[in-house]
Each structure stands twice: as C-alpha cells, then as structure tokens.
Image: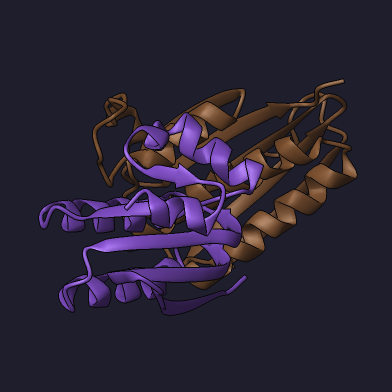
Chain colours: A brown, B purple
Amino acid sequence: MISPRAEGSIGHIELRLPSKAEWVGVARLAVAGIASRLNFSIEDIEDLKLAVAEACTNCIQHASESDEVRIACEVHPAKLVVTVEDRGKGFDARGVAPRTLGEPKVGGLGVFLIRTLMDDVSYEVNPQTGTRLTMTKHLRK
Amino acid sequence: MDITVDVREVPGKDGVRVVDLNGEIDVYTSPRVKETITDLIDQGHYDLIINLENVRYIDSTGLGVLIGGLKRVREHSGTVNLVCTNPQIKKIFDITGLVKIFGIYDSEPSASAAL
C-alpha cells in the first residue's frame, strides 16, 4: 500500500493504471506533466519519464499476478519523490549485477537506467505485498 | 504514443535496408519494431540502417530490440548502424555504453557510407 503523505510534502498525486503495456505511456506523460508544473528542466523531465516508464515496465513484466500498477508522486519544495509499486511477486532489482560496458546484453538495462537517471533509488521487495520502487529527483536551481 | 515503421532500399547499396521509425519506442510499441527487424534478417538482409531521426522517446525495451537485432546480424557478419540526432536519445545510448557497440551517425548518408 502506498504510504500516506510524507513529511515535508506539499502535494500528493496518485495514479492507478492497468498492468498493461499500453498504459505505460500514460504514466510517463502524467509524471512529465507534474515535473513540468514544478519547473524541472526539460532534460530532468526526460530522465523522470524514462525512469518511471522503466519502473512500470518492470512491474508489468515481472508481476504477472498484479492487475494494476500504482504510481504516487510526492511533491516537495525542492524534489519529486515517485513511488511505483505492484502487488505481484515482484522483481528483485537488488540482484541485478552492474553492467559491463561494451558487451551487447539485452537484460538489466531498465534498472541500470533508473539508477543512473534518478538521484536516489530504493527497493522494497515483499513476496506477500509486492515490490515498491521509490525514486527521487532533486530540483536543480 | 505510437510508432510507424517503414522499410526501404538504399540506391547503390545492394541488400542494405533502412528502417524508418517515427514516434515512441517503448514496451508497447517495441514488438512492432522487433517484428520488422526480425523479418528483414530472416529475408537475408544483414546490413541495416535504423533511422531514429523521428523517434522522440526510447526505453530499455527499444534498446533491447536494437541489441537483439545487432547480435543476430553479427552472426552473419552484418551490422546495424543508427541515425540519431535527438540529444536525449543520444544521451541514453551514451550512458548505457551502447555508443561503443553501435555505429551512431548524424545522417543517413554517413550511416550508409560506413557499411
């Protein structure tokens, strides 16, 4: 379950989308709109769009028992905290090995991108309740 | 939030095919891109130019399709060259290290000349 409004938050926006590929675009556009409202730069908005889409894609691809993906945006004066969670068995991204550049490899890119594009990333994996990914982007002045 | 995929020949470059992509490549649209690339390889086209000039967004599933295509054509001594001018998309290839395995060019003539 998504947490109640966090300390220091000045706004909370929550989306619940079907756990289907065609809805990922809606998630990334919604987060882009929120980030734009907060005056994030175009480059940071693109980073947020990609990170949120990757998180949703992981939910869809690895949480077959979940029928929805929940996206919560916690708005702070100088940062945006986005939580993406599902209720499936989850995908433990902590086990993904660091990438070796130069070797063509299909898997693991999504988690690598999330970690690279966002300022802080944390995972909670619970076989009973699902997987929650929390990621933070700070507003650069 | 859609993609159009078109395939055409390159005058003077026998067997080379250009795949023009227009739109966004994500978990929903990438299967269409994969199908096109797979069909071309199955038909014996092992030198491909993937034109990303009109692609506004790509995620890891899109990158995975391109990597998968590259691995398959390399089995036949072929290659995949990309045409990409969008700075945000170039950044994704840069931070994932894929700039080291793909030929990435600013124009189709450059990508074609390198084949």
Which residue ends up furthest to the front in the rendered image?
Answer: B12
Image quadrant in which you'd find residue A105: top left
Which is more toward the observer, B3 or A51? Answer: B3
Q: Nearer the viewer, residue B59 or A7?
A: B59
- Asked if one can make out residue A20 in the rendered structure from this viewpoint, the answer is no
Please say if B8 is above or below A77. Answer: below
Compared to residue A61, the image places residue A77 above or below, namely above
Picture quarter containing residue A135?
A: top right
Q: In which quarter of the image is the N terminus of chain B?
A: bottom right
x%, y% of residue A25?
A: 61, 63
Rendered residue at 81%/35% (across/down)? A41
Q: Residue A117 in the image: state x and y as whole percent.
A: 57, 31
Write the residue at 25% across / 40% down. A104
Looking at the image, residue B34 lies above or below residue A36: below
Image location (x, y in percent) of residue A32: 74, 50
Is B19 placed above or below A7 here? Answer: below
